[in-house]
Amino acid sequence: MTGLGADGAVAGPWLVVGLGNPGPTYAGNRHNIGFMVLDLLAERVGDRFRTHRARADVMQTRLAGTQAVLAKPHSFMNASGGPVAALRAFFKAEVGRVLVVHDELDIPFGAVRLKLGGGDNGHNGLRSVTASLGSRDYLRVRLGIGRPPGRMDPADFVLRDFSSVERKELAVVVDTAADAVEQVVAEGLAAAQNRFHSLTR
């Protein structure tokens, strides 16, 4: 069943969005870890994405017994907001039930952090989502990718594939993030933070 909104009315579905860049060229990039998590969630529910007119691959399903829409925008990262806002309007999802899964430079590789609202911390995908939704008050599952080595430009770093050492852990990281998404939907942000923030690195 769907949850109840603040006024007691039935709330809309969860809208879970993975951020990334479309196409095989970018598939293994650090910037695309949000897509990787959404692919795993789709695998878990045993369904597949379908093209939606809002310029995204979309799956309508249930997570933790609750209606959910999983989405991967077709736009490039810097323009992610347009499809997210269009999907929110189409499916009538409340901003507080929009959950964005994305990479985060300022968190160590492999760590998963959850929060509601806040700034974009230089992440162009988040900046686009915030501008298009007209609100910062959406949930985020932040996946640490660490800082670039030496003087490498962060813009180059996020568009490179994970290192061979990182790839050995990547499946576990993506699995943990998918668990975090499911727990936010099932039990709320605070319960998920208590569990996943204790897995410090």
Image (tube, rainbow, N blue to C red):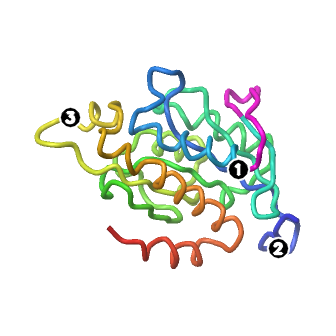
Say which element carries label 3.
loop
Q: Which residue is drawn at 34% across and 49% down?
A: 145
Task: Classify residue 167 as left or right of residue 190.
Answer: left
Above-or-below relation of 88 to 14: above
Taking 188 as reference, is 131 above or below it? above
Q: Please give the range of residues in magenta.
A: 45-57
Marks 3 and 2 in Cβ contact (< 8 Å)? no
83 or 160: nearer the viewer: 160
- What amino acid is found at the position of numbered circle 3 in the picture? Asp
Nearest to the eye among marks 1 and 2: give it: 1
Which residue is under mark 3?
Answer: 153
Count neighbours of disc 1 (C-alpha within 10 A) and say few if under 14, some if 14 to 19, many if 20 or more: few
- Residue at mark 2: 7
Horizontal and vertical percent position of residue 24 = 50, 21
Mark 1 and mark 2 lie on one chain; the one further toward the N terminus is: 2
Helix, strand or loop for disc 1: helix
Q: How far apart are marks 3 and 2 (CA)?
A: 47 Å
Q: Which of marks 3 and 1 is nearer the N terminus?
A: 1
Residue 192 vertical position relative to residue 141 in the rendered view, above or below? below
Mark 3 and mark 1: Cα distance apart in space: 36 Å
- State the residue lying farthest toward the left: 150
Task: Measure the C-alpha gap from mark 1 to mark 2.
Answer: 33 Å
Helix, strand or loop at mark 2: loop
Which label number is shown at residue 44?
1
